[in-house]
Structures are given as structure tokens and as C-alpha cells.
Amino acid sequence: MISRKLCERVLAAAASTGADYAELFAEKTFNRSVNMLDDKVQTVGDNVVAGVGIRVFKGLRSVAASTVDTSEEGLIRCALQAAQALGEGKAEISIVLKERRFGDIHPIKLVPGSESLSRKTDILKSAYFAARKADDAIVQVDASLLDVDHNILVANSDGIYAEDRQIRTRLYITAVADKGQGTQTGSTGPGARKGLEFFEEDVDPAAAGKEAARQALVMAGAGYCPAGVMPVVIDNGFGGVIFHEACGHSLEASSVAYGVSQFAGKLGQQIANEKVSAVDDGTIPNAWGSINFDDEGTPSHRNVLIEKGILKGYMIDKYGGRRMGMAPTGNARRQNYSFVTTSRMTNTFILDGEDKNEDIIASVEYGLYAKDMGGGSVNPATGGFNFAVKEGYMIRNGKVCEPVRGASLVGTGSEILMKIDMVGQNLRRAQGMCGSSSGSIPTDVGQPMIRVSSITVGGR
């Protein structure tokens, strides 16, 4: 996108007032989407995001600037603006870039941008009509097929000059059912760092559509969940969103480095039940949240966060690492060039345990089975959270019984980690978009089935 020699000149300009670190991040991203509603294709969208972000450090001072003018004049102007904002001084570092090849473990067979619109609409229609025709009680279906071709260049005063191409594809279906007790929704959103081969090798679009309809139909016939403190079994896949939100964000340097995390200063201490081990792993081939290197040029890692209940590590970007006196871990991410990079998760999940899933259910005399989780809110400083249960059932005498709607889980991350007293063996990941200070980025959440010994369940 930008030649190595021009990057050297731009970084030299950015560091001209005494910066001890300078960085250039360039991108050109193609976003495409096809949407179906009311039994027909409603919209076909294409947009391009292109620009450059420049950042400089001096000690713990940081200045960032961005521009869409990628001419040499425009880039030098942006670099000098960042330099001037940092302060007055003389250049103290020399810029010599060497091209780096990090390799690519994410093979793409069918590049979405090179495939026909008709092929994409065939995939979308298969999912849409499978959901629409599942039952007469399905009153609406909204389905979208999304693909992203994200091309980036990272150059910095550490000598890094590296490019990467990140292609991702995702299908998202929402079904609405009405059985006379008010409407309820069901949804599914499989995705991967793959092209359209994802729908030949991994996901059947029709099966995904039927799953969204099934969930909507189940919940449309459900009564309301009783409130109270009780054991809760949380299933795999998107059930991991609770760990991601209530605990994962509190393990990012963006909160730990400032001492506003519930887990700051607790390395080597027990923060979870000994049955809990968790990782953030950006190296999984073709996974939705995987990266070859992060947005600062640090190679992706498999980072052990918790091992048998003991806090082993944090997720760290360069600036957070400066404040913490620790090395970056390959977790610096941003939505696009206009956002300032910070520490973010990639694929974050609880590892398989030793308990059998049937034993977990059988262990609960009276409680809630959260088969699928929805959205919620979290305070990273306290770990306090409130999450909706998208699909839930009551457990009575060790058996899954009637479905219930309107359930929510209320607690704190530190509390729930200590109360996870059973961990199953059916680890599965699910896809989501995570929003934080550096924008919205793709991440996997995941876990096997777990049991929380007691937690506050909101309901009626």
C-alpha cells in the first residue's frame, strides 16, 4: 500500500520532535453485505474504508493522528501534526525498516470479492427460506451475508514493515415467532476467517436458518423464568460471552495498566475455581478472531490467562505494556485506521474440564439451564454484569424441563469465576463483534458446559 522508503520518511517526520516510538498503520478494507427481508433481497451494500493512522510515544505520553490523504505530502503533514502535538525536541531515534513475513495459516479458497452475487444470494436464500418455512408461527426472518477483505500495513520504529490480508465471512439470521403470547426471537451468526468455502466445509446455511427458527419457536411457547438465587448451568459456544465480558475485559491492559481492573496486581494469585483454565488464542487457523500479527506488528500468540484457577497473564498492547513494565502479547487491535489501538481479545475461551455434561445437569436439583446467552452490560472496573439468557430451561431433579423466557444473570466476574465448580467436555466457540475504545472487532467466545454453584437469576 505504501512503500517501505516512504514509510521511513513518514515515521522520521513523526519522531522529529523527540518521540521514542513512532508507528504507521495503513488499511484498505472492502465491506460487502447482502440482506433478505420479506422474502426478497432488500439491500446489497459495498463500502471501502481506507486511510492511515500515525502514533508516537514519548515515555508515557502518546499522540495519535489519522488521515485519508495517502499522498506523500498528506502523510508527512499528518506525521508532523502528531510530532508537534507531542512537544518540542530533537529526533532521538533512527528509522530503518525491514520487511517481515509472518506467514499465513488462514487459507482462503473462495475469495468472496471474486465470487458472483448470485452465489452469495443462493447461500442467503437457503438460510432465509429454511427459517421462514420452519413453522407457520414464524412471522418474520431477517438474514444477512457479510464478507470483509481487510488489508493492513504496519510499520514502526522497532523496524517492522509488514502487510496482511484478513478475509472473513459471516451469515446472520434472526427469526421472529408468535404463538399468541407475544413475539420472541431466535438468532444464529456463524462466521470464520474464511471465504465462501465456509458454507461448503463448515456450515450448512439451511441448518443455520432452521436453528434460528427453532430457538424462536421454543421461546415463543415459554413461560416466564422465576427469579432468585440458584445454580445455573451455562452451555457451550456463546455461553462464553459471560467470561469474555465479565472477566476478559478486566484482563486487558487497557484496564489493568490503570489499576481499574478487578484483577490488577493479582498475577500468580487464585482468581477462579481450580477447575477453570482459560486462554486467549489468536493463532487458531481460520478462526473468526484470529490474526497473523496484531495492529502494532506483534506476532499473534496463544496466551494462557488462567491455569487451574491461577491468574497467569494479561492481554497487553505496546502502550499498556509501557505502563505495566511488561511485553506486548499480540493483542493490540483497532476497528480501523481512525481508532487508536489498544489491548483487545482475539479468541477467548474456557478450556475443557473433566466433568461429564450429563453429570453437570444431573447435579442440579433446582436451577436454570442457560442453553444460549444474549447481550448484556459490564463494568470492567468492578466486573459487575447483567446478561440476558436468550434460550433457557428450568432444571428439576437433575433433568432439563420446561423452557423459560425473560431470564437474566446478575453478578460479578470475580464472583462467577470462583463459583464455577463443574466444567464439561464439549468446548465450542461462537462468533461475535466486540465493542470497546478502539472500535468494533471480530472475536470468538467459547467454553464447554459449566455449572455456577449459585448466582442471582433475574425473572418474575
Image (tube, rainbow, N blue to C red):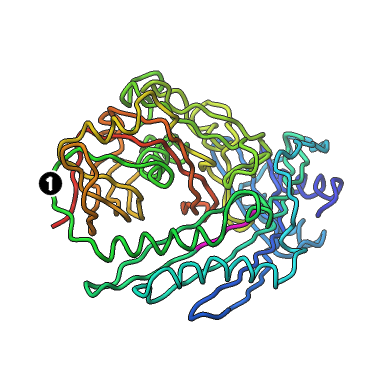
**Quadrant of the image occupied by residue 36:** bottom right
What residue sits 66% from the left and 35% below the top?
Answer: 298
Q: Is residue 39 above or below residue 97?
A: below
What residue sits 50% from the left and 58% below the top?
Answer: 208
Q: Position of residue 415 (x, y in %)?
A: 25, 34
Which residue matches tag 1?
Answer: 228
Q: Position of residue 137 (x, y in %)?
A: 34, 73
Instruction: Look at the image and tell me whether residue 447 can be seen.
Output: yes
**25, 224: nearer the viewer:** 224
**Looking at numbered disc 1 in the image, what kind of residue is underneath it?**
Gly
> Is 290 on the left-hand or right-hand side of 157?
left
Asked whether 144 falls inside the magenta stretch, the response is no
Other residues around mark 1 within 10 Å, as few (<14) / some (14–19) / many (≥20)? some
Please name the predominant secondary structure of the magenta segment in the image: strand
Q: Is residue 357 above or below residue 172?
A: above
Q: Is residue 379 above or below residue 220?
A: above
What residue sits 51% from the left and 41% below the top?
Answer: 345
**6, 393: nearer the viewer:** 393
**Element assignment for label 1:** strand
Q: Position of residue 45 (x, y in %)?
A: 63, 74
Instruction: Look at the image and tell me whether residue 296 can be seen.
Output: no
Q: Position of residue 115 (x, y in %)?
A: 75, 65
Where, quadrant-wise, is the N terminus in this rendering? bottom right
What segment carries the magenta color?
168-172
